[in-house]
Amino acid sequence: MHSILDQDIMYLPGVGPRKKEILSKELNINTFGDLLEYYPYKYVDRTQIYRIAQLQGDMPYVQLKGRILSFEEFDMGPRRKRLIAHFSDGWNVADLVWFQGTKYILNTYKVGVDYIVFGKPSMYGGRFQIAHPDIDEVTELKLTEMGMQPHYGTSERMKKAGITSRTMEKLTKGLLEQMQAPLTETLPPFITNALHLASRDEAMRGVHYPHNNDELQRAQMRLKFEELFYVQLNILRYANYHRRKYRGYNFSKIGQYFNDFYHNNLPFELTDAQKRVMHEIRNDMDCGRQMNRLVQGDVGSGKTLVALMAMLIAVDNGFQACLMAPTEILAEQHLATVLQMLKGTGVTAELLTGIVKGKRRTDVLQRLASGELHILVGTHALLEDNVQFANLGLAVVDEQHRFGVKQRAKLWAKNDNPPHVLVMTATPIPRTLAMTIYGDLDVSVIDELPPGRKPIQTLHKYDNQTTSLYAAFANR
């Protein structure tokens, strides 16, 4: 049984074949349901009536009640006219101005009839005027029902076809009035009741025609929750499918390279947070499933050290590792850190970015393909087809949000079975948001700085304070 929301938008009163074509091409609105899910981008309070004497030049949209006293039409060149309606609220007079559609205005609105006028006032020639206002007859407009008027985004093509924000408002209102039965609920009661969410029907009506700001916020909260809830469900579905489909390499061995580094080269004792995250990584790489883990921590918290130790576990088990950074400078910094920490261990590491060319690049690619090179640090250059690993087991990605899904997928294709993936970020992400954005990744947080590290400072300075700012950093 089809829902009313599945009906073709052409059959909604006021649409028809021509408007349907424009709505479909411009907004991808093809059904009643599509129209309901095209939400307003802003709202204007229509509950207050102003007198003309109360108007000021910097006011936003206002609403006046009165009648048209007379029309004046002026020629402004070839095919251009200006139409002015002198509008009175019984005490003062303001001008309503149109620069196009003047024939329609003269045929539609009459002298001596009471109207509600809505628009943005400005001062011109010593008198307030409102350009291209919304106008409704007093008998047709019930102010108590207007509440906050929705405004919908429209394109130039839509406006030329007569489909304005007001048109969209009337179409949506007509559809909601036509729908006598409440919209079918899409969330179970144990969620809506526990979180005190509005019903789907209340939310859909409230987001288009809220009577006040509280009603609007309640409607928006419900719709935002529902959207993120289903995004997260879909990501979790994908993650579970991925985990079932791909078996990860089993790194069961902690060998010479890791132990040599840990006992002889480790510059300081690991923090409890680093130990906890290493334990989580170790379990991932030894469980028979592909690791997909996000490590989050401030600058200086020791994320690179944790990633290096994970790479050493891969090398100990006969695999190679790579570290991909978003910029050449960051890749060079990572390589310098890795080479310094690995002195005397026998682990080999090289750089591959756009500046690595000619004989040096050829040498790096040959050593990588033969398995002689253990760790490769680079940028997007790692994704190129001619970059062939002998046996890639772990891919570390720094600042994941700078890379796309397809780019990460290219790393997976560097071996017959997808390598373990470790993602690092210094961007503070609330855990609930991390679950949404990185729903296919397990999340680890390094929430502790090593001893002696200065805390991160975030400063706000104006341009005239930059000299003192540079001096402050120079003296640190």
Image (cartoon, helix red, strand yellow):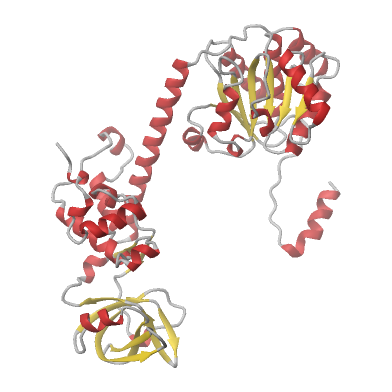
Please state the total of marks drawn on the protein image: 0
Residue 472 placement (x, y as % from top left): 82, 52
Q: Which of 332 and 262 is in front in this view?
A: 332
In the picture, residue 74 is in which quadrant?
Answer: bottom left
Q: Is residue 3 above or below residue 422?
A: below
Residue, x 78% and y 24% (percent of image)?
362
Percent across and percent down for residue 325 are 68, 33
* Residue 271 seen by the camera: no
Give the quarter of the image for residue 123. bottom left
Residue 452 in view in this figure: yes
Q: Residue at x 59, y 9 (%)?
A: 250
Q: Which of 173 and 194 is in front in this view?
A: 173
In the image, residue 117 sits, relative to residue 405, either above or below, namely below
Q: Nearer the viewer, residue 377 or 225?
A: 377
Q: Residue at x 74, y 16 (%)?
A: 374
- Kindly identify the residue that appears in the image at 19 percent across and 77 percent down: 138
| x then y, percent, for residue 142 | 20, 71
Q: In this view, does 437 lie to the left or right of 402?
A: left
Residue 293 lies, in percent from the top left, at 57, 24
In the image, taking residue 154 as reference, residue 69 lies left or right, namely left
The quadrant the N terminus occupies is top left
On the image, which quarter does residue 305 sit in? top right
Please tell me whether residue 342 is drawn above or below residue 71 in the rendered image: above
